Image (tube, grey):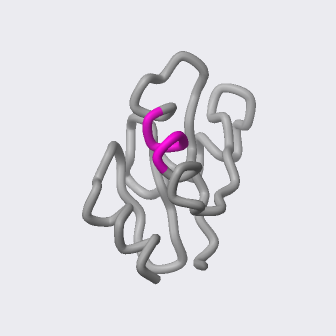
Amino acid sequence: MPKVTVFSQPGCVPCKKVKTWFDAKGVEYVERDVTQDPEALAHIRSLGHMGVPVVETPNKNWVGINLDNMKELVNA
């Protein structure tokens, strides 16, 4: 399974939904809280994202809930 990072922040409903979906499907991920990790915040901004959740894999990154990309991770 590919290495996945979920950039999130407390109280973010879409962040929770992405993590809950990944948990249910057995997708392993590392969570980085952009409110506590300045490097994580700088990283997602360098990718052009201004909001969370940002999901990053070795091949792509996206902001928000993207079921097509998320399903690709399960089928990888």
The residue positioned farthest toward the front in the image shown: 24
In the foreground, 41 or 2 = 2
Q: Position of residue 59 (x, y in %)?
A: 45, 79
Residue at 73% in and 37% down: 37
Seen in the image, is 2 located left or right of residue 33?
left
Q: Position of residue 20 (x, y in %)?
A: 52, 40
Name the chief secondary structure element in magenta: helix
Q: Magenta stretch?
A: 17-21
In the foreground, 74 or 9 = 74
Q: Position of residue 32 (x, y in %)?
A: 68, 43
Q: Is residue 18 magenta?
A: yes
Seen in the image, is 19 located left or right of residue 51?
right
Q: Quadrant of residue 9?
A: top right
Seen in the image, is 41 located left or right of residue 39?
left
Q: Is residue 20 magenta?
A: yes
Residue at 38% in and 61% down: 70
45 relative to 13, above or below: below
Residue at 60% in and 21% down: 10
51 relative to 67, above or below: above
27 relative to 60, above or below: above
Q: Quadrant of residue 35?
A: top right
